Image (cartoon, coloured by chain):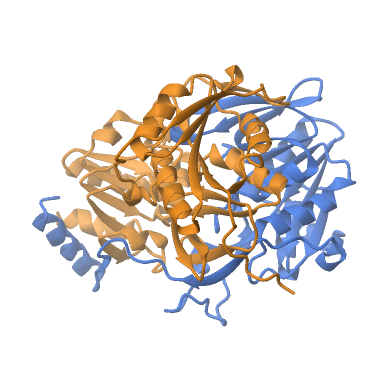
Amino acid sequence: MRILVCCKQVDEPESLLLDEQGRPYPNAPARRKLAEWDARALEEALVLKETRPGVEVWAVTVGPAEADAVLQRALGMGADQAAHILAADDPPLRPATIAAWLAEFARERGFDLILCGVMSEDSLQGLVGLMLAELLGLACATGVVGLALVPDQAGLRVEREMEGGRRQAMTLPLSALVTVGSSPRQPRYPSLSNLLRAKKAPRLLIEAETLAPAPVREERLGLSLPQRQRAGLRLVGSPAEKAAQLRDILRERSLL
Amino acid sequence: MSPAPVGIPPNGRVVAVLEHGPEGLAAVSLELAAAAKRLAEWLGLEARLVLLGDQPEVLARQAARASGLPVMALRAPCLAGFSGEAYRQVLAGLLPAWDAAVVMAGHTTSGLDWLPGLAARLGAACVSGVEGMRLGDGRPVFSRVTLHGKLVEEVAPRAWPLCLTLQPGALAAWVTPADSPGAVEVSEVAPPDCRSQVQDLPGEAGADAALGQATVVLAAGLGMGGPEKLEVLRRLAARLPNAALAGSRPVCDLGWLPYRQQVGLTGATVAPRLYIACGISGARQHTVGMQGAGFIVAISHDPQAAIFNLADVCLVEELPAFLQTFLDLI
Protein backbone atom coordinates (compact mmCIF):
# COMPACT_ATOMS: atom_id res chain seq x y z
CA MET A 1 0.00 0.00 0.00
CA ARG A 2 1.30 3.42 -0.97
CA ILE A 3 0.43 6.57 0.95
CA LEU A 4 1.25 10.11 -0.16
CA VAL A 5 1.32 12.94 2.37
CA CYS A 6 1.25 16.51 1.04
CA CYS A 7 3.43 18.76 3.18
CA LYS A 8 3.49 22.58 3.15
CA GLN A 9 6.13 24.79 4.69
CA VAL A 10 4.73 27.76 6.64
CA ASP A 11 6.17 30.65 8.63
CA GLU A 12 6.21 30.29 12.38
CA PRO A 13 3.82 33.05 13.41
CA GLU A 14 5.81 34.39 16.36
CA SER A 15 9.01 34.72 14.36
CA LEU A 16 7.27 36.61 11.57
CA LEU A 17 7.90 40.34 12.06
CA LEU A 18 6.27 42.95 9.86
CA ASP A 19 6.98 46.66 9.49
CA GLU A 20 4.30 49.40 9.63
CA GLN A 21 3.39 48.71 6.01
CA GLY A 22 2.94 45.03 6.72
CA ARG A 23 6.12 43.98 4.88
CA PRO A 24 8.39 41.35 6.41
CA TYR A 25 11.74 42.70 7.56
CA PRO A 26 14.23 41.49 4.91
CA ASN A 27 17.00 40.87 7.42
CA ALA A 28 14.89 38.93 9.89
CA PRO A 29 13.29 36.11 7.91
CA ALA A 30 10.71 34.09 9.78
CA ARG A 31 11.59 30.60 10.91
CA ARG A 32 9.71 28.09 8.79
CA LYS A 33 8.22 24.74 9.68
CA LEU A 34 6.01 21.90 8.52
CA ALA A 35 2.37 23.04 8.74
CA GLU A 36 0.64 21.68 11.81
CA TRP A 37 -2.23 19.79 10.16
CA ASP A 38 0.14 18.36 7.54
CA ALA A 39 2.29 17.04 10.39
CA ARG A 40 -0.81 15.36 11.80
CA ALA A 41 -1.59 13.86 8.39
CA LEU A 42 1.96 12.50 8.28
CA GLU A 43 1.59 11.06 11.78
CA GLU A 44 -1.59 9.23 10.70
CA ALA A 45 0.30 7.81 7.71
CA LEU A 46 3.17 6.64 9.92
CA VAL A 47 0.77 4.95 12.35
CA LEU A 48 -0.77 3.05 9.40
CA LYS A 49 2.73 2.04 8.34
CA GLU A 50 3.50 0.72 11.81
CA THR A 51 0.31 -1.27 12.07
CA ARG A 52 0.34 -2.84 8.59
CA PRO A 53 3.05 -4.63 6.67
CA GLY A 54 3.94 -3.34 3.22
CA VAL A 55 2.97 0.31 3.67
CA GLU A 56 5.21 2.82 1.92
CA VAL A 57 4.90 6.49 2.89
CA TRP A 58 5.82 9.29 0.49
CA ALA A 59 6.07 12.95 1.41
CA VAL A 60 5.71 15.64 -1.26
CA THR A 61 6.08 19.40 -1.04
CA VAL A 62 5.61 22.27 -3.49
CA GLY A 63 7.84 25.27 -2.93
CA PRO A 64 11.29 26.81 -3.23
CA ALA A 65 14.55 25.05 -2.35
CA GLU A 66 14.16 26.03 1.35
CA ALA A 67 11.02 23.88 1.54
CA ASP A 68 13.36 20.87 1.54
CA ALA A 69 13.41 21.28 5.33
CA VAL A 70 9.88 19.87 5.57
CA LEU A 71 10.94 16.83 3.54
CA GLN A 72 13.87 16.33 5.88
CA ARG A 73 11.44 16.53 8.78
CA ALA A 74 9.07 14.06 7.12
CA LEU A 75 11.87 11.60 6.35
CA GLY A 76 13.20 12.05 9.88
CA MET A 77 9.76 11.23 11.28
CA GLY A 78 9.70 8.02 9.23
CA ALA A 79 8.56 8.70 5.66
CA ASP A 80 10.21 6.35 3.12
CA GLN A 81 10.41 8.61 0.06
CA ALA A 82 10.35 12.33 -0.60
CA ALA A 83 9.51 14.38 -3.68
CA HIS A 84 9.95 18.11 -4.17
CA ILE A 85 8.11 20.12 -6.82
CA LEU A 86 10.38 23.13 -7.07
CA ALA A 87 8.61 26.46 -7.55
CA ALA A 88 8.97 30.00 -6.25
CA ASP A 89 6.20 30.84 -3.79
CA ASP A 90 6.45 34.60 -3.46
CA PRO A 91 3.75 35.70 -4.15
CA PRO A 92 2.15 32.55 -2.75
CA LEU A 93 1.08 29.93 -5.28
CA ARG A 94 -2.66 29.68 -5.81
CA PRO A 95 -4.26 26.52 -4.35
CA ALA A 96 -5.53 25.43 -7.79
CA THR A 97 -1.96 25.60 -9.12
CA ILE A 98 -0.62 23.49 -6.26
CA ALA A 99 -3.46 20.98 -6.69
CA ALA A 100 -2.83 20.71 -10.43
CA TRP A 101 0.90 20.02 -9.94
CA LEU A 102 0.28 17.53 -7.15
CA ALA A 103 -2.29 15.77 -9.35
CA GLU A 104 0.21 15.48 -12.19
CA PHE A 105 2.82 14.12 -9.78
CA ALA A 106 0.47 11.61 -8.14
CA ARG A 107 -1.50 10.45 -11.19
CA GLU A 108 0.73 7.65 -12.45
CA ARG A 109 2.34 6.69 -9.18
CA GLY A 110 -0.33 4.38 -7.78
CA PHE A 111 -1.07 5.93 -4.42
CA ASP A 112 -3.84 4.12 -2.53
CA LEU A 113 -4.29 6.93 -0.07
CA ILE A 114 -3.41 10.62 -0.19
CA LEU A 115 -3.38 12.60 3.05
CA CYS A 116 -3.29 16.40 3.39
CA GLY A 117 -3.76 18.77 6.29
CA VAL A 118 -7.31 20.16 6.34
CA MET A 119 -5.82 23.63 5.69
CA SER A 120 -2.58 25.41 6.46
CA GLU A 121 -2.58 27.50 9.60
CA ASP A 122 -1.08 30.56 7.91
CA SER A 123 -3.65 31.17 5.17
CA LEU A 124 -6.57 28.94 6.30
CA GLN A 125 -7.85 28.39 2.76
CA GLY A 126 -8.73 24.70 2.96
CA LEU A 127 -8.77 24.23 -0.83
CA VAL A 128 -5.85 22.11 -2.05
CA GLY A 129 -6.98 18.74 -0.65
CA LEU A 130 -10.45 18.63 -2.14
CA MET A 131 -9.27 20.17 -5.44
CA LEU A 132 -6.64 17.43 -5.70
CA ALA A 133 -9.22 14.72 -4.95
CA GLU A 134 -11.45 16.09 -7.70
CA LEU A 135 -8.63 16.26 -10.25
CA LEU A 136 -7.72 12.65 -9.50
CA GLY A 137 -11.34 11.47 -9.25
CA LEU A 138 -10.84 10.12 -5.73
CA ALA A 139 -13.38 9.58 -2.98
CA CYS A 140 -12.58 11.96 -0.16
CA ALA A 141 -13.28 13.15 3.36
CA THR A 142 -12.26 16.44 4.97
CA GLY A 143 -11.47 17.51 8.51
CA VAL A 144 -10.85 13.94 9.64
CA VAL A 145 -9.90 13.39 13.28
CA GLY A 146 -9.61 9.61 13.27
CA LEU A 147 -8.96 7.07 10.53
CA ALA A 148 -8.54 3.31 10.19
CA LEU A 149 -8.29 0.87 7.33
CA VAL A 150 -11.19 -1.55 7.25
CA PRO A 151 -9.94 -5.13 7.72
CA ASP A 152 -9.92 -6.21 4.07
CA GLN A 153 -7.94 -3.06 3.15
CA ALA A 154 -10.39 -2.18 0.40
CA GLY A 155 -11.58 0.86 2.26
CA LEU A 156 -11.20 3.35 4.98
CA ARG A 157 -13.32 4.27 7.96
CA VAL A 158 -12.94 7.85 9.16
CA GLU A 159 -14.49 10.24 11.62
CA ARG A 160 -14.80 13.91 10.66
CA GLU A 161 -15.45 16.84 12.90
CA MET A 162 -17.97 19.58 12.21
CA GLU A 163 -19.05 22.82 13.86
CA GLY A 164 -19.79 22.73 17.56
CA GLY A 165 -18.01 19.38 18.00
CA ARG A 166 -20.59 17.40 15.95
CA ARG A 167 -19.10 14.35 14.27
CA GLN A 168 -19.76 12.17 11.25
CA ALA A 169 -18.56 8.64 10.55
CA MET A 170 -17.70 7.85 6.94
CA THR A 171 -16.58 4.87 4.93
CA LEU A 172 -14.66 5.38 1.72
CA PRO A 173 -13.35 2.97 -0.89
CA LEU A 174 -9.63 3.14 -1.74
CA SER A 175 -8.07 4.95 -3.52
CA ALA A 176 -9.09 7.93 -1.44
CA LEU A 177 -7.96 11.34 -0.29
CA VAL A 178 -8.39 12.44 3.30
CA THR A 179 -7.68 15.86 4.80
CA VAL A 180 -6.67 15.56 8.43
CA GLY A 181 -7.86 18.05 11.03
CA SER A 182 -7.03 18.22 14.71
CA SER A 183 -6.61 14.50 15.24
CA PRO A 184 -5.67 13.57 18.78
CA ARG A 185 -2.40 11.97 17.66
CA GLN A 186 0.55 14.28 18.30
CA PRO A 187 3.12 14.31 15.49
CA ARG A 188 6.23 12.48 16.66
CA TYR A 189 9.58 14.20 17.07
CA PRO A 190 12.29 12.89 14.77
CA SER A 191 15.48 11.85 16.55
CA LEU A 192 18.63 13.81 15.72
CA SER A 193 20.22 10.76 14.09
CA ASN A 194 17.15 10.24 11.92
CA LEU A 195 17.18 13.91 10.93
CA LEU A 196 20.84 13.70 9.93
CA ARG A 197 20.18 10.56 7.92
CA ALA A 198 17.19 12.28 6.32
CA LYS A 199 19.39 15.14 5.19
CA LYS A 200 21.37 12.77 3.01
CA ALA A 201 18.43 10.69 1.76
CA PRO A 202 17.64 11.12 -1.95
CA ARG A 203 14.76 13.32 -3.13
CA LEU A 204 12.83 13.14 -6.32
CA LEU A 205 13.22 16.69 -7.69
CA ILE A 206 10.69 18.00 -10.20
CA GLU A 207 10.97 21.49 -11.68
CA ALA A 208 7.49 23.01 -11.81
CA GLU A 209 8.26 24.35 -15.31
CA THR A 210 8.40 20.77 -16.58
CA LEU A 211 4.77 20.22 -15.49
CA ALA A 212 1.71 21.30 -17.45
CA PRO A 213 1.11 25.04 -16.94
CA ALA A 214 -1.62 25.49 -14.35
CA PRO A 215 -4.23 28.17 -15.02
CA VAL A 216 -4.21 31.12 -12.62
CA ARG A 217 -7.80 32.17 -12.07
CA GLU A 218 -7.36 34.69 -9.25
CA GLU A 219 -4.91 37.47 -8.54
CA ARG A 220 -3.79 39.10 -5.34
CA LEU A 221 -4.24 42.86 -5.63
CA GLY A 222 -2.51 43.84 -2.42
CA LEU A 223 -1.78 43.25 1.23
CA SER A 224 -2.56 45.48 4.18
CA LEU A 225 -2.50 45.37 7.94
CA PRO A 226 -5.84 44.35 9.46
CA GLN A 227 -8.03 47.13 10.76
CA ARG A 228 -8.51 47.17 14.48
CA GLN A 229 -12.01 46.16 15.37
CA ARG A 230 -11.80 47.65 18.87
CA ALA A 231 -9.87 50.34 20.71
CA GLY A 232 -6.75 48.18 21.02
CA LEU A 233 -5.32 50.33 23.82
CA ARG A 234 -1.70 49.24 24.35
CA LEU A 235 -0.62 49.45 27.97
CA VAL A 236 2.98 50.49 28.58
CA GLY A 237 5.31 50.37 31.57
CA SER A 238 6.73 47.67 33.80
CA PRO A 239 4.70 44.50 34.32
CA ALA A 240 3.56 45.82 37.71
CA GLU A 241 2.52 49.17 36.22
CA LYS A 242 0.61 47.46 33.42
CA ALA A 243 -1.10 45.15 35.89
CA ALA A 244 -2.21 48.17 37.92
CA GLN A 245 -3.51 49.92 34.80
CA LEU A 246 -5.41 46.81 33.78
CA ARG A 247 -6.92 46.52 37.27
CA ASP A 248 -8.06 50.17 37.12
CA ILE A 249 -9.54 49.81 33.63
CA LEU A 250 -11.49 46.72 34.63
CA ARG A 251 -12.68 48.32 37.88
CA GLU A 252 -13.87 51.43 36.02
CA ARG A 253 -16.07 49.18 33.93
CA SER A 254 -17.20 47.17 36.95
CA LEU A 255 -15.60 44.09 35.45
CA LEU A 256 -13.59 43.31 38.56
CA MET B 1 2.25 36.16 -19.47
CA SER B 2 -0.64 36.66 -17.10
CA PRO B 3 -4.15 36.75 -18.53
CA ALA B 4 -6.01 40.06 -18.72
CA PRO B 5 -8.39 40.85 -15.85
CA VAL B 6 -11.86 39.61 -16.50
CA GLY B 7 -14.80 41.94 -15.96
CA ILE B 8 -18.37 41.23 -15.01
CA PRO B 9 -19.96 38.21 -16.68
CA PRO B 10 -22.66 39.29 -19.14
CA ASN B 11 -25.36 37.21 -17.49
CA GLY B 12 -25.92 34.46 -15.02
CA ARG B 13 -26.80 34.04 -11.37
CA VAL B 14 -25.23 34.44 -7.98
CA VAL B 15 -26.06 31.18 -6.20
CA ALA B 16 -25.63 30.82 -2.45
CA VAL B 17 -25.96 27.33 -0.98
CA LEU B 18 -27.43 27.53 2.51
CA GLU B 19 -26.27 25.59 5.52
CA HIS B 20 -28.46 23.90 8.04
CA GLY B 21 -28.11 21.41 10.85
CA PRO B 22 -30.00 19.98 13.79
CA GLU B 23 -30.71 23.50 15.05
CA GLY B 24 -32.20 24.70 11.76
CA LEU B 25 -30.69 27.31 9.43
CA ALA B 26 -27.10 28.16 10.34
CA ALA B 27 -26.42 31.85 11.03
CA VAL B 28 -24.00 31.91 8.10
CA SER B 29 -26.92 31.13 5.76
CA LEU B 30 -28.44 34.60 6.20
CA GLU B 31 -25.01 36.16 5.80
CA LEU B 32 -24.60 34.21 2.57
CA ALA B 33 -27.98 35.50 1.40
CA ALA B 34 -27.03 39.09 2.23
CA ALA B 35 -23.68 38.76 0.46
CA ALA B 36 -25.29 37.12 -2.60
CA LYS B 37 -27.83 39.94 -2.80
CA ARG B 38 -25.14 42.64 -2.64
CA LEU B 39 -22.89 40.87 -5.15
CA ALA B 40 -25.81 40.35 -7.55
CA GLU B 41 -26.68 44.06 -7.37
CA TRP B 42 -23.10 45.06 -8.11
CA LEU B 43 -22.78 42.68 -11.04
CA GLY B 44 -26.30 43.23 -12.41
CA LEU B 45 -27.11 39.54 -11.93
CA GLU B 46 -29.89 37.63 -10.23
CA ALA B 47 -29.38 36.14 -6.76
CA ARG B 48 -30.77 32.73 -5.89
CA LEU B 49 -30.54 30.68 -2.71
CA VAL B 50 -30.35 26.89 -2.70
CA LEU B 51 -31.14 24.54 0.13
CA LEU B 52 -30.60 20.77 -0.01
CA GLY B 53 -32.33 18.30 2.29
CA ASP B 54 -34.80 15.46 2.67
CA GLN B 55 -37.45 17.90 3.95
CA PRO B 56 -36.13 21.26 2.77
CA GLU B 57 -39.43 23.21 2.42
CA VAL B 58 -39.76 24.63 5.93
CA LEU B 59 -36.22 25.96 6.09
CA ALA B 60 -36.43 27.18 2.48
CA ARG B 61 -39.52 29.26 3.35
CA GLN B 62 -37.79 30.60 6.42
CA ALA B 63 -34.79 31.66 4.31
CA ALA B 64 -37.08 33.20 1.66
CA ARG B 65 -38.93 35.23 4.31
CA ALA B 66 -35.75 36.41 5.98
CA SER B 67 -33.87 37.33 2.81
CA GLY B 68 -36.57 38.25 0.28
CA LEU B 69 -34.64 36.16 -2.28
CA PRO B 70 -35.94 33.24 -4.34
CA VAL B 71 -35.04 29.87 -2.84
CA MET B 72 -34.67 26.63 -4.72
CA ALA B 73 -35.31 23.71 -2.36
CA LEU B 74 -33.71 20.51 -3.63
CA ARG B 75 -35.26 17.39 -2.15
CA ALA B 76 -33.94 13.83 -2.02
CA PRO B 77 -34.27 11.23 0.74
CA CYS B 78 -30.52 10.69 0.84
CA LEU B 79 -29.94 14.37 1.68
CA ALA B 80 -31.21 13.89 5.25
CA GLY B 81 -27.72 14.34 6.67
CA PHE B 82 -24.89 16.41 5.23
CA SER B 83 -22.67 14.68 2.69
CA GLY B 84 -20.08 16.68 0.78
CA GLU B 85 -20.05 14.14 -2.02
CA ALA B 86 -23.85 14.30 -2.41
CA TYR B 87 -23.70 18.12 -2.49
CA ARG B 88 -20.95 18.02 -5.14
CA GLN B 89 -22.87 15.53 -7.29
CA VAL B 90 -26.22 17.32 -7.09
CA LEU B 91 -24.81 20.82 -7.60
CA ALA B 92 -22.38 19.87 -10.38
CA GLY B 93 -25.38 18.72 -12.40
CA LEU B 94 -27.45 21.85 -11.80
CA LEU B 95 -25.10 24.84 -11.61
CA PRO B 96 -24.17 24.97 -15.32
CA ALA B 97 -27.87 24.68 -16.22
CA TRP B 98 -28.61 27.59 -13.89
CA ASP B 99 -25.89 29.62 -15.53
CA ALA B 100 -24.18 30.18 -12.18
CA ALA B 101 -21.59 32.97 -12.41
CA VAL B 102 -20.90 32.91 -8.66
CA VAL B 103 -21.33 30.00 -6.23
CA MET B 104 -21.10 30.69 -2.52
CA ALA B 105 -20.90 28.55 0.63
CA GLY B 106 -19.89 29.03 4.24
CA HIS B 107 -16.20 28.81 5.18
CA THR B 108 -17.17 25.93 7.44
CA THR B 109 -16.56 22.22 7.75
CA SER B 110 -19.53 21.71 5.41
CA GLY B 111 -18.79 24.36 2.78
CA LEU B 112 -15.16 23.28 2.62
CA ASP B 113 -16.30 19.67 2.16
CA TRP B 114 -17.87 20.32 -1.26
CA LEU B 115 -17.12 23.73 -2.76
CA PRO B 116 -13.37 23.34 -3.50
CA GLY B 117 -14.03 20.09 -5.37
CA LEU B 118 -16.78 21.71 -7.38
CA ALA B 119 -14.49 24.65 -8.18
CA ALA B 120 -11.92 22.20 -9.56
CA ARG B 121 -14.59 20.38 -11.56
CA LEU B 122 -15.98 23.61 -13.04
CA GLY B 123 -12.53 25.11 -13.64
CA ALA B 124 -13.72 28.05 -11.55
CA ALA B 125 -11.83 30.82 -9.82
CA CYS B 126 -11.94 30.20 -6.09
CA VAL B 127 -11.48 32.47 -3.05
CA SER B 128 -12.04 31.03 0.40
CA GLY B 129 -12.48 32.56 3.84
CA VAL B 130 -13.89 35.83 2.44
CA GLU B 131 -14.42 38.47 5.13
CA GLY B 132 -15.22 41.51 3.00
CA MET B 133 -16.09 42.43 -0.58
CA ARG B 134 -16.22 45.56 -2.71
CA LEU B 135 -16.63 46.50 -6.34
CA GLY B 136 -13.39 47.87 -7.74
CA ASP B 137 -12.74 48.77 -11.41
CA GLY B 138 -15.78 46.88 -12.55
CA ARG B 139 -15.03 43.61 -10.85
CA PRO B 140 -15.61 42.22 -7.40
CA VAL B 141 -12.69 42.33 -4.98
CA PHE B 142 -12.59 40.10 -1.93
CA SER B 143 -10.64 40.49 1.29
CA ARG B 144 -9.49 37.67 3.53
CA VAL B 145 -6.97 37.33 6.33
CA THR B 146 -3.69 35.56 5.72
CA LEU B 147 -0.26 35.03 7.27
CA HIS B 148 -1.61 33.87 10.64
CA GLY B 149 -4.14 36.71 10.73
CA LYS B 150 -1.37 39.32 10.55
CA LEU B 151 -2.30 40.63 7.11
CA VAL B 152 -5.37 41.11 4.95
CA GLU B 153 -5.10 40.25 1.25
CA GLU B 154 -7.36 41.49 -1.52
CA VAL B 155 -8.06 38.97 -4.25
CA ALA B 156 -9.94 39.43 -7.53
CA PRO B 157 -11.12 36.74 -9.95
CA ARG B 158 -9.57 36.44 -13.41
CA ALA B 159 -12.12 33.92 -14.61
CA TRP B 160 -15.75 32.89 -14.29
CA PRO B 161 -17.49 31.12 -12.74
CA LEU B 162 -16.28 32.13 -9.31
CA CYS B 163 -16.56 30.00 -6.16
CA LEU B 164 -16.43 31.67 -2.74
CA THR B 165 -16.54 30.59 0.89
CA LEU B 166 -17.68 33.21 3.37
CA GLN B 167 -16.22 33.43 6.88
CA PRO B 168 -19.13 33.05 9.35
CA GLY B 169 -19.86 36.26 11.22
CA ALA B 170 -17.76 38.50 8.96
CA LEU B 171 -20.70 40.05 7.09
CA ALA B 172 -23.31 39.72 9.84
CA ALA B 173 -23.87 43.51 9.65
CA TRP B 174 -25.14 43.14 6.07
CA VAL B 175 -28.11 41.03 7.15
CA THR B 176 -31.25 43.18 7.03
CA PRO B 177 -34.95 42.24 7.20
CA ALA B 178 -36.68 41.74 3.85
CA ASP B 179 -39.81 43.64 2.74
CA SER B 180 -41.51 40.64 1.20
CA PRO B 181 -40.66 36.94 1.09
CA GLY B 182 -38.96 35.44 -1.95
CA ALA B 183 -40.55 32.65 -3.96
CA VAL B 184 -39.82 29.04 -3.00
CA GLU B 185 -39.56 26.35 -5.63
CA VAL B 186 -39.27 22.75 -4.50
CA SER B 187 -37.64 20.33 -6.86
CA GLU B 188 -36.96 16.61 -6.55
CA VAL B 189 -33.44 15.60 -7.44
CA ALA B 190 -32.23 12.17 -8.48
CA PRO B 191 -30.33 10.43 -5.68
CA PRO B 192 -26.63 11.06 -6.27
CA ASP B 193 -24.41 8.06 -6.85
CA CYS B 194 -22.04 8.35 -3.86
CA ARG B 195 -18.95 6.26 -3.17
CA SER B 196 -18.72 7.39 0.46
CA GLN B 197 -21.25 6.60 3.14
CA VAL B 198 -21.89 9.15 5.84
CA GLN B 199 -23.56 8.79 9.19
CA ASP B 200 -24.11 11.51 11.79
CA LEU B 201 -22.80 10.38 15.16
CA PRO B 202 -24.63 11.05 18.40
CA GLY B 203 -23.29 14.26 19.97
CA GLU B 204 -20.40 14.10 22.37
CA ALA B 205 -20.67 15.84 25.71
CA GLY B 206 -21.16 19.41 24.51
CA ALA B 207 -19.50 22.55 25.73
CA ASP B 208 -19.13 23.06 29.44
CA ALA B 209 -22.39 24.67 30.63
CA ALA B 210 -20.43 26.95 32.99
CA LEU B 211 -18.59 28.37 29.97
CA GLY B 212 -21.76 29.62 28.30
CA GLN B 213 -23.03 31.28 31.46
CA ALA B 214 -19.78 32.76 32.75
CA THR B 215 -19.47 36.53 33.16
CA VAL B 216 -15.71 36.31 32.78
CA VAL B 217 -13.89 33.85 30.52
CA LEU B 218 -10.15 33.33 31.00
CA ALA B 219 -8.82 31.67 27.85
CA ALA B 220 -5.47 29.93 27.51
CA GLY B 221 -3.50 29.54 24.28
CA LEU B 222 -0.22 27.80 23.51
CA GLY B 223 1.58 30.98 24.61
CA MET B 224 0.87 30.01 28.23
CA GLY B 225 3.78 27.62 27.86
CA GLY B 226 2.52 24.34 29.33
CA PRO B 227 -0.30 22.61 31.20
CA GLU B 228 1.22 23.26 34.61
CA LYS B 229 1.31 26.97 33.84
CA LEU B 230 -2.49 27.08 33.71
CA GLU B 231 -2.54 26.93 37.52
CA VAL B 232 -2.31 30.70 37.82
CA LEU B 233 -5.31 31.04 35.49
CA ARG B 234 -7.27 28.67 37.72
CA ARG B 235 -6.42 30.76 40.76
CA LEU B 236 -7.40 33.92 38.92
CA ALA B 237 -10.70 32.30 37.91
CA ALA B 238 -11.36 31.43 41.53
CA ARG B 239 -10.86 35.08 42.52
CA LEU B 240 -13.21 36.57 39.94
CA PRO B 241 -17.00 36.33 40.22
CA ASN B 242 -18.59 33.75 37.89
CA ALA B 243 -15.41 33.14 35.93
CA ALA B 244 -14.66 30.10 33.78
CA LEU B 245 -11.52 28.73 32.17
CA ALA B 246 -11.41 28.08 28.40
CA GLY B 247 -8.81 27.09 25.84
CA SER B 248 -7.95 27.47 22.18
CA ARG B 249 -8.05 24.46 19.90
CA PRO B 250 -4.32 23.60 20.14
CA VAL B 251 -4.46 23.74 23.93
CA CYS B 252 -7.29 21.21 23.96
CA ASP B 253 -5.54 19.07 21.32
CA LEU B 254 -2.53 18.85 23.59
CA GLY B 255 -4.75 17.82 26.48
CA TRP B 256 -3.96 20.86 28.64
CA LEU B 257 -7.72 21.36 28.94
CA PRO B 258 -10.64 19.07 28.01
CA TYR B 259 -12.42 19.66 24.69
CA ARG B 260 -15.61 20.82 26.43
CA GLN B 261 -13.66 23.92 27.44
CA GLN B 262 -12.65 24.77 23.89
CA VAL B 263 -13.80 28.06 22.40
CA GLY B 264 -13.90 28.50 18.61
CA LEU B 265 -15.20 27.08 15.36
CA THR B 266 -15.35 23.45 16.49
CA GLY B 267 -16.02 24.34 20.14
CA ALA B 268 -18.19 26.74 22.11
CA THR B 269 -19.23 30.25 21.09
CA VAL B 270 -19.22 32.54 24.11
CA ALA B 271 -20.12 36.18 24.76
CA PRO B 272 -19.13 36.97 28.36
CA ARG B 273 -18.87 40.53 29.70
CA LEU B 274 -15.09 40.12 29.96
CA TYR B 275 -12.81 37.85 27.92
CA ILE B 276 -9.13 37.64 28.78
CA ALA B 277 -7.10 35.92 26.04
CA CYS B 278 -3.79 34.66 27.42
CA GLY B 279 -1.14 33.51 24.94
CA ILE B 280 -3.67 33.16 22.12
CA SER B 281 -2.48 34.03 18.61
CA GLY B 282 -5.90 35.04 17.33
CA ALA B 283 -6.46 32.45 14.60
CA ARG B 284 -9.93 32.72 13.03
CA GLN B 285 -10.72 29.24 14.33
CA HIS B 286 -10.68 30.73 17.79
CA THR B 287 -11.90 34.27 17.31
CA VAL B 288 -15.22 33.28 15.69
CA GLY B 289 -16.09 31.82 19.08
CA MET B 290 -15.34 34.88 21.20
CA GLN B 291 -15.60 38.04 19.09
CA GLY B 292 -18.98 38.87 20.63
CA ALA B 293 -17.52 39.31 24.13
CA GLY B 294 -18.32 42.62 25.84
CA PHE B 295 -14.75 43.61 26.66
CA ILE B 296 -11.65 41.83 25.42
CA VAL B 297 -8.22 41.91 27.04
CA ALA B 298 -5.40 40.22 25.11
CA ILE B 299 -2.06 39.26 26.62
CA SER B 300 0.68 37.82 24.41
CA HIS B 301 4.43 38.05 24.14
CA ASP B 302 4.12 38.40 20.33
CA PRO B 303 3.64 42.15 19.71
CA GLN B 304 2.05 41.39 16.33
CA ALA B 305 -0.34 38.66 17.44
CA ALA B 306 -3.59 38.90 15.45
CA ILE B 307 -5.64 38.76 18.65
CA PHE B 308 -4.62 42.37 19.36
CA ASN B 309 -6.72 43.56 16.40
CA LEU B 310 -9.91 42.66 18.15
CA ALA B 311 -8.95 43.50 21.72
CA ASP B 312 -10.02 46.53 23.76
CA VAL B 313 -6.83 46.36 25.80
CA CYS B 314 -3.53 44.86 24.59
CA LEU B 315 -0.61 43.76 26.75
CA VAL B 316 2.68 42.56 25.32
CA GLU B 317 3.92 40.54 28.27
CA GLU B 318 5.47 37.25 29.28
CA LEU B 319 3.11 34.53 30.43
CA PRO B 320 2.28 33.24 32.94
CA ALA B 321 4.45 35.72 34.91
CA PHE B 322 2.22 38.70 34.16
CA LEU B 323 -0.89 36.90 35.38
CA GLN B 324 0.79 36.26 38.73
CA THR B 325 1.65 39.97 38.99
CA PHE B 326 -1.97 40.85 38.18
CA LEU B 327 -3.33 38.30 40.63
CA ASP B 328 -1.15 39.73 43.42
CA LEU B 329 -2.63 43.17 42.77
CA ILE B 330 -6.33 42.44 42.92
- Front one among B183 and B287: B183
Residue B145 in sight here: yes
Q: Which residue is the extreme one toward the bottom?
A: A27
A157 is higher (above) or lower (below) than A17? above
The front one of A223 and B92 is B92
* Number of numbered discs on residues: 0
Quadrant assignment, res B262: top left
Asked if residue A116 can be seen in this view, the reply is no
In the rendered image, which quarter is residue B196 located in? Answer: top right
Q: Position of residue A22 (x, y in %)?
A: 47, 75
**Left or right: where A103 falls relative to B311:** right
At horizontal 78% and vertical 53% (from top left) the residue drawn is A102
- In this view of the protein, which residue sits in the foreground, B174 or B21? B174
Q: Residue furthest top?
A: B77
Residue B255 in the image: state x and y as whole percent.
47, 38
Q: From the viewer's perspective, is B307 left or right of B107?
A: left
Query: Quick one: which chain is blue?
Result: A
Q: Is residue A1 above or below residue B236?
A: above
| Residue B265 percent coordinates (x, y) | 44, 42
- Give B296 or B189, whichever is nearer the viewer: B189
Work out which quarter of the rendered image holds the N terminus of chain B and state it: bottom right
Residue at screen point 45% across, 29% down: B184
Instruction: Name the tint of chain B in the rendering.
Output: orange
